Amino acid sequence: YLSDKIKILIDGVAINNEVLGSSHFHMDFPMQLVERIEVLRGPNSTLYGAGAFYGTVNIITKLGSNKKENQLFAGAGSYQYRTVGTNINTASGDWKLFADGYYKQNNKSLPVKGKDQGTEEEMKDFSVGFKAINGGFELLTRLKQSTYGNFYSFEGETNPIPEKEQGHYNSYFFSQLSYKTALDDYKLETKASFSYRVSDIKANVKSVLEEKNIFALVGIPMNDGFFTHEKLGEENFEAEAILTLPRIKSNDILIGAGVRQVNIIEDEYYSSIENAITANRDAILIHPNYNSFRFRESKESAFWANPTTTLLPENMDRTIGYGYIQDLISVTDNVDLVLGVRADDYSDYGVQLSKRAGLVYRATDDMIFKLLYGSAFRAPTLIEAYQNGHINSRAGDSTIVPEETDTYEAVAIYMPNLNHKLSLNLFYSKLKNVIDLEEFPNTDPGYQNFKERYSKGVEFEYFFKTAMEHNFYFNATYLDTQYTIPPEEGEIPLNQSMPDISKVMLKAMYVYRPTGALSFGTTWRYFSETTKTELSWVSNDATCDSAHIFDETVTYRFSPSSELRLSVKNLFNREVTLPSYYYSTDGGIVREGRNYFLSYIYNF
């Protein structure tokens, strides 16, 4: 497992996952419920703490923005996709009440090259949210659950035991109480929150025949195949206070402090292979073919040293205390300076500092320049640091330390009028103690720190908008990252430009509204050919070809209260590929071709 290395927030509430560091399953909210998505690029640990490493994404729902809207929506699309949802709001005395919810599902399966069986990517997903406001008091709560099939196709394989249940279940619940008050010219916000997450994964790893032959070598009957089942539950309790001081000369100062307690409350692990070995340990050890047994101790030392039915050691909790201060200084009418620092104290890693500085210069009414610096860190997840040794899984390494980044940006923004806006962003990042995989097959730990890596790039954006008919956006990004490929046994680390990514990415969006009722939206995306790995053992074509992808959306408004929308993704049915797992497939894994989605929205 590797963390997302970005911070996900829903309506300003952080999605916590100290076990895996992954929260991407919250990124699939239907857009009918979303008011806007705020993307803060670069390090943001001074405000959001660990995990705001490469960026922060805040999904603001209509519920979260207190939008007084009542709507029903329904939709259908490719892969038997179906969805339905609603936003509602009401008031009762001094209380303002908001609620939303949706359900969606599909039976998605894509062809796999050379296989009769397709992928198993079926999905069921739902969420319900509620918000209550009374003066400065606010209660925000949400439950989200999803079940997805396992993506065997990224290994170039299909389900090896198709008759056996498999899939990935995620459930996340959070509730936050907050209160805002003013004391003279001081503004105080206090928050108390609770979250509970469950991850339940059933995976089929190898076929019955493969495992039967392996165990037959040591005289053990094995008719189950290789499958695993892991379940982890995590709860977080957090309290935070934020104080905004009255302006002191030209300084706007914000001070915050808080504490978060992380508890592991469910931890179960089952492996059919480990169960068979444990039940027949003595017979396997004395068998004359033991030294040829695929799962012998010299090959799986982490498991043999401590056979267990959990992923983590007992009493694996974590406490995090933090404090931060930010000062926005109006140096002159045209120059602003922002300074910030934050300290996070981890019960298992000690104090980590994050820093921020930014200078904004409004040269003219049309031109703005920015110089930005930010540092961030990410503590190892509990899996990366402490996971028990299991067959076909990476053991944690308690000696790894938090990874850090220092990022520098220079930004120029030109806005000659309300119709045009251009921006240019140059950035450079230095990463230290980067957490990555450890690829030595005969060692227990599965993770390690790399000393340094570097990343640099440039981004250009252009916006054009008229009052009614035309809306155009263009983005061009170039990225070059120095990467160290984790060495295998007997090899040295290999430094190269990061493999498996597109260095050049372009995107253009154009919306044309010939009338107030009808609009056409066209999106074009370009990804350059992915950088080739320099690993000597890779014999397949490890690159993915460049891709031009067009999407089209047509919206018709029958009335102010109802609209119909048709979206076609990959309009020209171009072949789109993603890098395959350990380069198992020539040219990468083929993903979706042309697909569509039709939706209807009714406001009341």
Image (cartoon, rainbow, N blue to C red):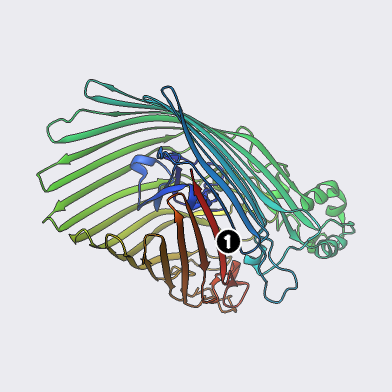
On screen, 258 above or below 208?
A: above
Residue 390: give x, y in percent of width and height: 69, 50
Residue 209: give x, y in percent of width and height: 84, 65
192 vs 113, left or right, is left
Give the residue at x 63% y 61%.
441
Quadrant in which residue 180 is drawn: top left
Q: Is residue 398 visible?
A: no
Q: Residue furthest front?
A: 559
Give the residue at x 82% y 63%.
214
Numbered label tally: 1
Which of these two is toward me, 494 or 316? 316
Residue 42: give x, y in percent of width and height: 35, 53
Which of these two is toward me, 593 or 44? 593
On screen, 594 above or below 47?
A: below
472 vs 348, left or right, is left
On screen, 43 above or below 474?
A: above
Question: At numbered mark 1, what does the secondary structure look like: helix, strand or loop?
Answer: loop
Give the residue at x 21% y 54%.
371
381 vs 226, left or right, is left
Q: Is residue 380 visible?
A: yes
Which of these two is toward me, 556 or 147? 556
Residue 533: give x, y in percent of width and height: 50, 73
Residue type for callout 1: Glu
- Can you identify the residue that label 1 sits on? 439
Give the residue at x 50% y 46%.
380
On screen, 163 above or below 398?
A: below
